[in-house]
Amino acid sequence: MLAARIEHAAEIRGAAERIAAHVRRTPLLPADFHDGLLVKPECLQVNGSFKTRGACNAVARLSGQSPRPKGVITHSSGNHATAVAYAARRFGLPATVVIPSSASPNKIAAARHLGAEVVTAGVTFDNREQVAEDLAGSSGLHLVHPYDDWDIIHGAATSGLEILEDAPRVGCVVAPIGGGGQVAGLALAIDSFGPRIQVFGVEPELANDAARSFAAGELKSLESDPSTIAEGVKSKSIGQRNFEVIVRRRLVAGIVTVSEQELEYAIRTAWSAMHLAVEPTGALALAAWLQRRVPLGTRERPTVLVLSGGNFDPRQTARILLGGAA
Amino acid sequence: MLAARIEHAAEIRGAAERIAAHVRRTPLLPADFHDGLLVKPECLQVNGSFKTRGACNAVARLSGQSPRPKGVITHSSGNHATAVAYAARRFGLPATVVIPSSASPNKIAAARHLGAEVVTAGVTFDNREQVAEDLAGSSGLHLVHPYDDWDIIHGAATSGLEILEDAPRVGCVVAPIGGGGQVAGLALAIDSFGPRIQVFGVEPELANDAARSFAAGELKSLESDPSTIAEGVKSKSIGQRNFEVIVRRRLVAGIVTVSEQELEYAIRTAWSAMHLAVEPTGALALAAWLQRRVPLGTRERPTVLVLSGGNFDPRQTARILLGGAA
């Protein structure tokens, strides 16, 4: 364990240096409504999500390899696709992204705008990973997995490093969990640099595979595409590497779930009481906090909520806003 | 002029010290879509607007006077009312706020929640100032004017100080102008600490009194309550002190106007491309920038837009967001 801890610590420090010129150090903002609550608004990150951290770390690594890869490919319905397209452009590698044809048009447009080749024909939620793997095999492009990849995990961990620097007395860090890249990264950062801090993952009840995996001690999967509004955490199960960190090594204190209604209330709270235009996934941690499923935090031991992204759909946003206008 | 400059500089430094424990140092955030554009998100300020700065400075001053005032009173349809209620609570003085009965219920609720006595009976946009002055006279409460007050102006100026510290090479600062407190404050901060930086004020075409005053060199007023969605800049004319700084001393480079449609586009841009949930007034500077009516900024000489507030109406925001969803 000690050897692993030292290795992860070095990788996280390395990631922070590698990506510094390409990402933003997001501020840590206090909430007006509770003394002892801070948020890490990764919706203010470059491209509007924490995914830019991992993608830049993975692509920076690849671009330094000899021989240099011909390009990168990934599968994602959203923020990871944009992040890989951005990272590839910054490091001068071609990028291909495999996006389900049902994905929101603005996410497809964002990846194209950043110069990526977008493949949507015949791509579904179920076959996207296979399509990307097949294309990687046939084209010689390097597959950058959205979460089951140590470089992605160590890149995501850099926000944990910033939290520890900006709030050394933090008692608890809460973040959304889909494939588990962000939560595994935060857990490793804290295991390396700030022990005795609790890390919680939050997912929708409708996509509760991580909670079930955590409870059972073995990897559980969703049966089908979950109907949650939290698009960013729809992956069927957490990755192998993420499972190792989160479940097997128990570097996470718990996985909690929230209902869709609780999530919508949290989205409205983020917008109207924190003035941060988050996407649904970006409000998961706040939803758990508002329902008192994670420690509330005190001035001496604050709780930090990671608001992971801000790339919302305007129509959905309008509906959620009106849902709260009595 | 030199004596005035030295005096204002000292007052601004004093305000920054006086309010430090009660306001937030907002970050300076780069925009993804233009290299050389930064925003100062005062929507992330305590209570969601820059008004907290001036109110804390004015109330801190009053609370230190001997004899101590019985309390404070102000008139406002929004953010200034909340800010005075907050400041009064922080400094232990009773607060009364005079709000037109037509104001949005959540702004009235915000002031009440902070412990202020709210007077709405018989109050209109036209008579609110007179009602507050009469009540101040009869009750012995000290009137804290929303903008025509040096303590309010010097408090607002503290965001200019932060901009100069965080972006010493800034070339241009753009902010909304209603009564002129914020723009006068920024202009004085820049005159004192960072000369050769241009300051622009932005107002709706429908409430263009400041632009007309600036062009004519004399104080012009609106005839009636303007129908702009930018609630925060509806005052009929800028104040006397603000006129002195902005028009007579010409510490401002220009006042530009935007249409309601241009403003709605800017609101959508702030929400979706910057992930900041601003209120209409908070997007005025961005609207002017998007229409190229102010310098765009370069990496060497960036432009800073002050996004002044985030207390939006959910129904109105839903309508505006849908306006862009083709």
Image (cartoon, coloured by chain):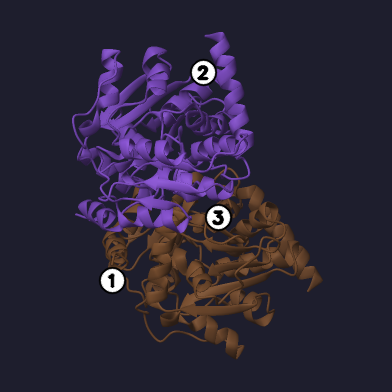
Chain colours: A brown, B purple
Q: Chain of mark 1?
A: A
Q: Are marks 3 and 2 in contact (CB under 8 Å)?
A: no
Q: Quadrant of the C terminus of chain A?
A: bottom left
* Residue A217: quadrant of the picture: bottom right
Q: Report the amino acid beneath label 2.
A: Asp
Q: Report the amino acid beneath label 1.
A: Gly
Q: Which mark is residue B191?
A: 2
Label 1: few (<14), some (14–19) or many (≥20) C-alpha neighbours in 10 Å: few
Query: Tag 3, which secondary structure?
Result: helix
Q: Report the amino acid beneath label 3.
A: Arg
Q: Position of residue B186 (x, y in %)?
A: 47, 27
Label 3: few (<14), some (14–19) or many (≥20) C-alpha neighbours in 10 Å: many
Q: Given this view, does label 3 or label 1 mark the residue nearer the observer?
A: 3
Q: Chain of mark 2?
A: B
Q: Position of residue B51 (x, y in %)?
A: 45, 40
Q: Which mark is residue A122?
A: 1
Q: Given this view, does label 3 or label 2 mark the residue nearer the observer?
A: 2
Let me know if residue B160 appears in the view: yes
